[in-house]
Image (cartoon, rainbow, N blue to C red):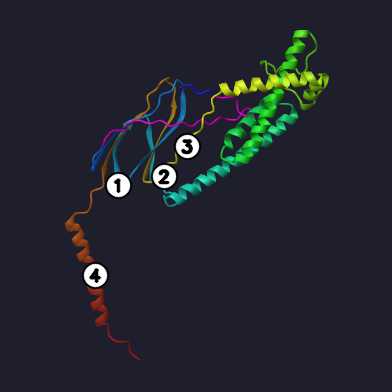
Amino acid sequence: MLIPLEKPAPEGQATRVEFFFTSRPGRGSTRALNLNLDGPRFDLPLERITWQVFLNQKWHLDDWQGTLQLEEAALATPAGPLDLGSYLSNETVLLRQQTQQAEQYLNLGNRLLESGDTLQARRAFQNAYGLSQHDAAFNEDARVQLQNLKMQQAIVGLNFRQAKVAGEPAAPAPRRGTEALNYTQQQANDILARNTAEDNAVQLRFAERLIQQQDAAVASPAALRATLPDQGRVLTFTRPLEVNRWAELRLQLEASAAPPASVFLKFLVLGTTLILALVLILLGRTRPPAST
């Protein structure tokens, strides 16, 4: 699995990657389950591995074996009823959180742009644009700021190349270890001020065509998020470390259904309840009247 990732904005933060993996767990009957749960394999060492297996409450875990250890078994407590209204409410909360995160990235991009870190500012604007697809107005604002920064970076890069070819002193200088340019807004204005209006118009058209070609070549995948309700009996399996590459992660579970109460036991409980009720009624009738 190859998942291309850009450096997060700001640098140093962890990048969270979510993907969905499916496998055939096996078949079961109405009275027993025999499941084989296989996980994906990675060409990487893994740490803090956690699996959560959700079973119906009627199933009782009899035996298990595999590459993970059983840490906890408990009943999941759903936050609310499992209906369309609760699902839409949860989706609204998640979208609101995404909007807040997008606003934070947009504000961060503007601060980075003022400080002259245009590379990180572009990543922040890209994050704001990707997280706000559900909000048309905010998404358009993030798109415009991202597009303006792309155009500015292209024009500054063209002027830097021209100055380098002509042997003239070039400002700004490339970032250490890369060919990317970081510059302040004042440096960008100085570059545009040195050129004629005709040169700036030609560079603007060329940069616009260049950006359009780059955007057309880059795929824009849409994220899919599966909403899985937490219900039933949850089994938590963990493994602190796996150093082997392409290591197999597997669990084999054997579970049985709780035996239903027999007909005799049901009649016994019902009869005992009726006898107790009858005794209480007779005691109430035979109780002597209270003296005055």
Label 4 close to label 1 by CB (< 8 Å):
no
The numbered disc on residue 225 is 3
Among numbered discs 2 and 4, the one appearing first in the sequence: 2
Where does label 4 land, which residue?
Answer: 276
What's under tag 3, amino acid-wise? Arg
Mark-to-mark CA distance, 3 and 4: 55 Å
Query: Is disc 2 placed on a helix, strand or loop?
Result: loop
Among numbered discs 1 and 2, the one appearing first in the sequence: 1
What's under tag 4, amino acid-wise? Leu
Among numbered discs 2 and 3, the one appearing first in the sequence: 3
The residue at the far bottom in this view is 292
Residue drawn 47% across the image and 28% down it: 47
- Quarter holding the C terminus is bottom left
Foreground: disc 2 or disc 3: 3
Where does label 2 land, which residue?
Answer: 230
Where does label 1 land, which residue?
Answer: 58
- Crowding around mark 3 (Cα neighbors within 10 Å: few <14, some 14 to 19, many 20+) is few
Q: Please provide the residue range marked out in magenta.
A: 5-27
- Crowding around mark 4 (Cα neighbors within 10 Å: few <14, some 14 to 19, many 20+) is few
Q: Is residue 95 above or below residue 123?
A: below
Mark-to-mark CA distance, 2 and 4: 40 Å
